[in-house]
Image: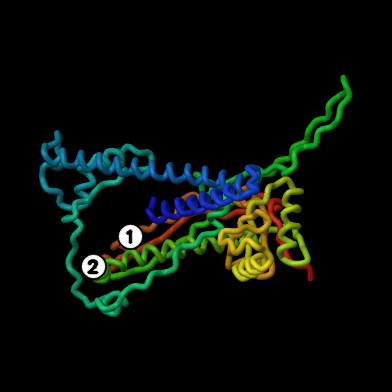
Amino acid sequence: MSTAVLEKLTGSRDALIDRADELTRSDDFDPDNAEYVASRAEIEKLNTQIAGHVEWQKTRQAAADIDQTILRLDRKRDPAGDGPKRNEQPQGMGDVFIRSQAWESYRQAPRGTSSQVSIPSELLQRAPLTTTSGTGSPWKSPSRISIAVPSRQTPLLDLVQRIPVASNSVDWITYPAAAPLAAVVAELGAKPEATITASIVTVTLDTIAHYAQASRQLLEDSGAARAFIEGELSRGVLDKIEAEIASAIAAATLPAATGADLMAAIRVGMGTVQSAGFQPNAVILNPADYAALDIDVFGKTLLGPAVSGSFWGLRPVAVGAQPAGTAVVGDFTAAINYLERSDVSVYVTDSHASTFTSNVFTFLAEARGKGVVTRAEGLVVCSKLP
């Protein structure tokens, strides 16, 4: 897992902790406050994700360290049989691999998989670039500096529940939001049978990916180039995931709520969601509407502006794709899920097509998953009365 993803998880958790602390410090704090309860639950979920990813990184690093130790020991002795002598200097990356313990795992694994193998730096050297490729790069001139790009924003992905899945086709089962209603039965009378109707829905995950290329000379001459390319490719994948979740919300058939203004409509929407058996925890707003509501609330309060304030106790989330003049209120943890097969990963190779002989590296960023509205009745579209 990349450091950027860990920073995103911890940043989201810390923001929720700050908000929960702010709620507890208020004079009229209620431990059963919907936003407070939802924040606590989300903090616990994020802590579990962070701990799991950290443990996974430790496991991967430990496996790589063991493989490297075995490789160093093998170089000091000759193995039995007709195989290569492992105390000799490896002749290439392939030679390193077949001398490692990972090679044994690769041959024995059902699908031909292996652990990571560390390659000595001297075996990664290639012939120097003899062309002038990359001289027109914006990073080439030592007098030029790189301006920081906008940080990656994933408001919808941070809001919905992320569910790891193990295949490309996923089935889920849904039940009615309301429990079957029991009946008053006289003593010795027959009890009615409860009817619970389940629905099965099948969805196929999306592969979201794109790539970019850069010359070896460019990457050697500019230390920032590689980080910039990988960061921008990852950000582009996340932006597309955000857009797909927004499209899933827009395509769903959702209940509607109206009011004298958008603030009133949001409150009506909360009641609609609660009537359907869900607990609303957030409201999606167009950034311009978010600003207008903030200004309106500021003008009607004696407490001053609150940067992390809420509307009717709901967490406001600014989403550029949300149509202006409307809002979506709902229980986003229950109503929307992001089915995640693989997180954003960046792969690098110098052997794409004919680029090996041209000293060109190809960077590929990819993720596999899909955002789905699983309980449309848990969301409500809110708007001002015409």
Viewer-proximal residue among 137 and 369 = 137
Count how many numbered circles sit on residues in the image: 2
Looking at the image, residue 192 lies above or below residue 128: above
Residue at horizontal 57 percent and vertical 52 percent from the top? 160
Give the structural element (helix, strand or loop) at label 1.
Answer: strand
> How packed is label 1: few (under 14 Cα within 10 Å), some, or many (20 or more)?
some
Q: Is mark 2 on a helix, strand or loop?
A: helix
Q: Write down the residue under mark 1.
A: 348
In x, y percent, where is residue 7? Answer: 42, 54
In the image, taking residue 350 as reference, residue 3 lies left or right, namely right
The quadrant in which residue 328 appears is bottom right
Image x and y of residue 287, in percent: 59, 68
- Where residue 366 sits, quadrant-wise, is bottom left
Which residue in the structure is indicated by mark 2?
A: 220
Which label number is shown at residue 87? Answer: none
Q: Where is residue 52 in the image (x, y as percent from the top left)?
A: 43, 42
Amino acid type shown at disc 2: Glu
